[in-house]
Image (cartoon, helix red, strand yellow):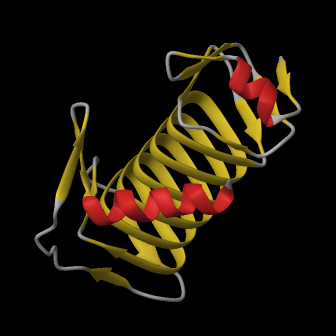
Amino acid sequence: MKIYKTQRQVEKDIKDGVLAIKGDVKFECSISIDASIVVTTGDIDARNITAWKITAGNITALDIYALNIDAGDITAGDIDAWDITAWNITAEDIDARNIDAGNITAGDIDAGNILYYAVCFAYNNIKCLSIKAKRRNARHFCLDGEITIKKEEPKEIIKIGDRIYDKNDVEEALKNIKSIT
């Protein structure tokens, strides 16, 4: 297992805008990097992660701020991201542009489009542009609140590589990154 104790140790391992790690990794410090995190054949264990893109088998963290998260399982206090692709997501609050997951469990969900496999529920509320299951006998619901389908408003967009993002979302994420550093 690779263990990072300081931001400086993390920055030393970044090559060409990517922090590439083979095997498990543990961050014993909060990090804020202008790079992608790619973990092959391993898991991420951290308190706070701020990155442009995170790819890993499993992510366990208190807070995750990222443009893209691609993971097997995510367990977190708060997730603030543009796109989340995961098998299972367990979180207090999820604020995301698009979610594509196996199962989602959360306190509150505020998202663009939600696509899930079997179950998507929030203890309080779900606000989204659309919510759709991948299987016929699936269920989405709120225990103590309601599901609200938001109307999509025309937005200014920014293209980064081959991805398109809402300009306001990018600006907000950059503010979050700057406030952490």
Q: Position of residue 5 (x, y in %)?
A: 89, 32
Question: Looking at the image, which residue is at 31% across and 83% down?
Answer: 148
Taking depth in this image into account, of 13 and 144 the one nearest to the observer is: 13
State which quadrant residue 72 falls in.
top right
Taking depth in this image into account, of 163 and 144 the one nearest to the observer is: 163
Q: Is residue 166 above or below residue 34?
A: below
Q: Is residue 67 above or below residue 18?
A: below
Question: Looking at the image, which residue is at 70% across and 26% down?
Answer: 11
Q: Position of residue 2 (x, y in %)?
A: 81, 18
Question: Looking at the image, which residue is at 71% across and 13% down?
Answer: 23
State which quadrant residue 20 falls in.
top right
Side of 47 where 15 appears, left or right: left
Q: Is residue 26 above or below residue 130?
A: above
Q: Is residue 57 visible?
A: yes
Taking depth in this image into account, of 68 and 87 the one nearest to the observer is: 68
Side of 173 where 30 appears, left or right: right
Q: Position of residue 86 (x, y in %)?
A: 47, 40
Question: Looking at the image, which residue is at 67% across and 58% down?
Answer: 180
Side of 174 where 74 appears, left or right: right
Q: Is residue 77 visible?
A: no
Residue most toward the left? 154
Taking depth in this image into account, of 105 and 85 the one nearest to the observer is: 85
Which part of the image, by quadrant, shows the N terminus?
Answer: top right
Q: Position of residue 144 (x, y in %)?
A: 54, 88
Q: How many marks?
A: 0
Residue most toward the bottom? 145
